[in-house]
Amino acid sequence: MKKHILVLAVSTLFFAVHSSAQTSKQMVRLAKIVVDPAQLADYNAALKKQMSTAIATEPGVLTYYAVADKADASHITILEIYADEAAYKRHIETPHFKAYKAAVQNMVKSLELTDVDLVGVAVKPRQ
């Protein structure tokens, strides 16, 4: 439950800062990943590299937030926001995403992808 509250809070912040008429076209996804604890440092390094490359090189990749469960850091939840479904489809065909998937294939014990819709926004404005 705490993970879902944190993810919702993070997504709310993003939408408040970047809201526009285009948000209805955005693709928002939660990726729930369980990583082999013995390989967690390597997984986190690969994830950070993939995320930073995608943000730097792909206009349709709008944001990533990756969080680890405080009780078990091998349980990672990623909030992914793309401009639209076409941007997501382009993303998963990029060389850096394919390299990430190949690098982590033996590190990931489970992966659950859930597409979600924003149902509300309430944040304090940036100062």
Image (spheres, grey):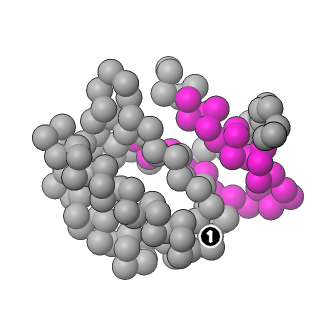
Question: What's the residue at 73%, 61% (across, down)?
Answer: 25
Toward which corner of the image does residue 83 lie, by quadrant? bottom right
- Is 72 displayed left or right of 63 in the figure? left
Q: Nearer the viewer, residue 41 or 115?
A: 41
Looking at the picture, does residue 72 appear above or below residue 24? above
The amino acid beneath tag 1 is Gly
Question: What's the residue at 22%, 64% (across, down)?
Answer: 103
Looking at the picture, does residue 105 appear above or below residue 87? above
- Give x and y (percent) for residue 57: 53, 76
Residue reaching furthest left?
38
User: Which range is magenta?
Assistant: 6-32
- Within the magenta stretch, is there residue 97? no
Q: How many marks?
A: 1
Residue reaching furthest right?
21
Categorize mark 1 by other alpha carbons within 10 Å: few (<14), some (14-19), many (20+). Answer: many
Q: The residue tagged with tag 1: helix, strand or loop? A: loop
- Is 52 displayed left or right of 104 in the figure? right
Q: Nearer the viewer, residue 76 or 30?
A: 76
Question: What's the residue at 45%, 69% (across, down)?
Answer: 53
Looking at the picture, does residue 95 appear above or below residue 110? below
- Give x and y (percent) for residue 88: 54, 67
- Is 18 displayed left or right of 94 in the figure? right
- Give x and y (percent) for residue 80: 54, 52
- Give x and y (percent) for residue 125: 82, 38
Of helix, strand and loop, which mostly describes the magenta segment? Answer: helix
Visible residue check, residue 113? yes
Which residue is the site of mark 1? 60
Toward which corner of the image does residue 63 lie, by quadrant? bottom right
